[in-house]
Amino acid sequence: MLRRVFTHSATTEPMSPRRSLNRSRKHRRAGAAACALALAWAALSTVTLPTPPAEAVNGNPAGGSGRFTPVIDWIDWTEMTGTRTENWTRILPDGATGVAWSTPTQVSSDIWRTSRCTISNVITTNVGRNEPKLTTHKGIEVEYNTGNWRGDGLARLYNDGSNYSNGVATGNNFRSNMLIGIANLQDSATHQFQVDCKAYLVTSSAKPAKNQLDALPNKVELPMEGMVFADAESSNWQGTGGQKEYIGVSPTPYDTNRDVFYRLLETAQSESGCNTNSWGGLITMSTPVGNRNGIKLRPDGGECSAQVNRGYGPSSVMLISNMQSGFVEVHGGGKSAVALGVVSYIDYGDAPESYGTAGSVFQPSWTGGKLSGYDALDISSQSRPVEAESGSWFNLSQAARQQHLATAGPAVVRLGKLTDNDERIVYSADASADDTTGVDDEDALPTDWDRVIWTDIGKQWSQQISCSGTGTKVAGWVDWNRDGSFSAGERSEVTSCSKAGQATLNWTVPQDAKRSTLNGEGAATFMRLRITGPLANGQAAEDPQPTGIALNGEVEDHQIQVQLPNLTMVKEVDNTAAGSLGLSANDWTLTASPKTGAEVSGAGGFSASYIPQGKTVLSESSSSAKSAGYKATVTCAPHPNSDIKTPASTLDAASKTLDLATGEWMRCTIVNTALPGQVVWSKVDDAGNALAGTVFTLASSSLNNGQVEVSDCATDNGKTACPKGSVDQDPRAGYFKVVGLTWGEYSITETQAPAGYHISAETLTKTLDGSAPAAGNDDATPTLDLGQVTNTRIKGSVTWTKTDERGNAIKGAQWSLTPLDSNGRPLPDQARTIADCAGTCAQGSLDTDATPGAFKLAELGYGSYQLIETKAPTGYVLDATPRTITISTPDQVVALGNIPNRKSAVPAIPLTGGSAATTYLIAGGAVLGITALVMAIQARKRRRAGMD
């Protein structure tokens, strides 16, 4: 289940093949040293997003003979920052810093893998021969096309397939068309620089351009296992005065707690006719920061292209573990180059796509090719080649001929015994795709297990698997609820692989587990197994997750079956009486409540779900108030997809209790039928008293013809039921009920009012549906109360003026207003007194005319009244004549005109007493006293006159 990852790069070669190949021996980079740095095992940290396969980049397996073509993702140096272009040459000058991203490779629909490499501390320690066409003479050349010189060995190992077939040039163009080289700028120049590379996962809905990568947010850095150091061109080591080409790398440990190791991956060299060997020396080398330990690659003679027609090499490729950064030194008579790439072995699951992509980057176990190693295929040091500095030296060409090469073996951390490369993700309906491609490495489960789980809810279920690795974490998932995904609750307990190569996974069967059988449901379910191991940077093994990419481990998917007793519940709805306002099946939640075990429920029902054997109560609920307007019935039968013909399960319909037999799959259906509804309302006066004799129009789109006339059905005080043909079925006067209605919006409008009342202009509109209250405890009919319609009495007013006989208004009269019954008889208990309101009318005064002697009675209700004067103005004779007033039409004004009173013949002493009477008596007494005094004086005068 291993896969390769490549990065495609467009190549533009500034120099023609003829110009390059016809250069003088001195200037055509004879024995030019080149170095290739490749990120090895960029450990992809766990990502929970699914990851489809990436497309291969740069290396074409059909074109090159490299042993690691499927897994090395070479980084091209195009678009490096900090560079300048002179004479078709891209230059990173001394002192400048250049940053280049590798071409992104797709990991998932929106996740991309890429690497960011920084070249800094560029120092030209030997300028070499000045190139007259350049203005910059100190710096390194980037975007070197390996194979630009016909003797380059790296081009035979890794190319794009255009000019090679299985490592053999198909013509006279030897270019690899891979711009992965960083070369010395001028012939015979020596450069030192620092390289620092990091691998990332980036998120982008589309493949990002290189110049977009720095700005992308949420980049996830991936730990690295190491780098590859490769002699990318043939090199020369000539005698006195000749070329002495070499390349060197001084690695900086990525994990300071681990050592750095060197392994020979491969050497490219003409098979015969060339006696020059490629050597590697562990030495102390010069760097921009001083002397450091490192490895130096150089030949011990002239390049093979000078010894054999169409010869190449020798060029060696070294794996440097635990390296992420370091210092590079390049010296050549021609050119040298640097490249970066990612080596990834990835194993993928092959379950259906809905389960998401699960992949594990894994490190194969390495054997052989280790410098100073102790295994049979490791490489021992030898006497150093001529003119070599002190150190441990190894004949790499000899080791390659003896097959003392590093070989990737079985994964160190794995499930079962086998792990294969998955070049792409292949989802499959039965999780068998990985069994038929490459090696069938789905071998963790015992071969004698039939892949059927027999268990029950809440119980423990265990399965033993085979595995390998130390410090591991092992977990499995079973899609118990068969929802097409692996959830956290479906994971086993996390365990580890034992020294004996076994692990026992323990599951607790969750409450939502479902029966999954091919013969019954026609649908199996799936199991996913994962193992993770310690990371290359020293971190502990990751916690296994159901999806995503793990750094170190393996994944296996298996189709399995689960046997559990099952129940399916279905909701059906009869909305004949509900019309368009009816509920759908999903508006109810159906629930099965077993006597033991957990409830199962679902909107509109639920598909095959585990229910323990025994009695289960079937019920339903709804958050919609309309559900109260339905009547439910329950039936149960064997599920059509089950093998049951005559079930042992039984249903008690009255209690809605299913007694489920072991292993049976039953389907119970609850049918809800909408109940026809009814509307009610009442007619009252403004005092709240029921009024008879009204006619309404009931309107609704749910009615035939859209409306119906409703006359008040008033029987003998409501004691007798209304006739069957009556629309109103409420026998009480002033009360209405219309039954057998389809749900919908209803409105009532009064078309005829009782005598003496205004007709109501109000239209009452409400919606009848199942949420309406039930008619009673024993009657579930949805009953919509439209409310009360109030009629107000017809009212009028009466006016008159109290005058004297000459028509002058006089104040002070009082009156009595008494209603008359239908027979014209007064109703004295309802009589009201009317006082003349002169000047300002007090609140509550019946007379509303402030003019003295003028009267106005407003808001008189419909009917007849008797008006009688009960007190005359002072000095006037009382007029007790009854006067009848009748209000029969709205806003009627009865004008009685002037009602005169005549004066009394002799002033009468007011019989009621008070200050007026007292004044009158005093004045009268005074007049009589004065008269008597005058008469006495006159009599005295007459007597005196007679005496005289």
Image (spheres, grey):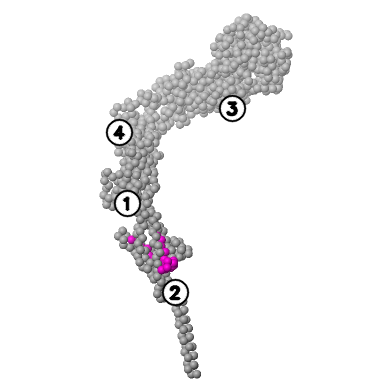
Cα distance between the residues tagged 1 and 3: 80 Å
**Foreground of the two, 408 or 8:** 8
Cα distance between the residues tagged 4 and 2: 102 Å
Cα distance between the residues tagged 1 and 2: 54 Å
Does residue 883 appear to the left or right of 195 in the view shown?
left
CB under 8 Å between discs 3 and 2: no
Q: Which residue type carries mark 3?
A: Leu
Residue 728 image position (x, y, % from top left): 30, 46
Q: Residue at x 44, y 75 (%)?
A: 917
Residue 18 image position (x, y, % from top left): 65, 7
Q: Earlier in the sequence, mark 4 or mark 1?
A: 4
Disc on res. 526: none
Circle 1 residue: 692
Q: Earlier in the sequence, mark 1 or mark 2?
A: 1
Q: Nearer the viewer, mark 4 or mark 2?
A: 2
Q: Which residue type carries mark 2?
A: Gly
Q: Residue at x 60, y 25 (%)?
A: 212
Disc on res. 650: 4
Q: Is residue 296 magenta?
A: no
Disc on res. 914: 2
**Res. 481 image quadrant:** top left
Against 760, residue 526 (above or below) is above
Q: Residue at x 47, y 81 (%)?
A: 926
Disc on res. 216: 3
Q: Which residue type carries mark 4?
A: Thr
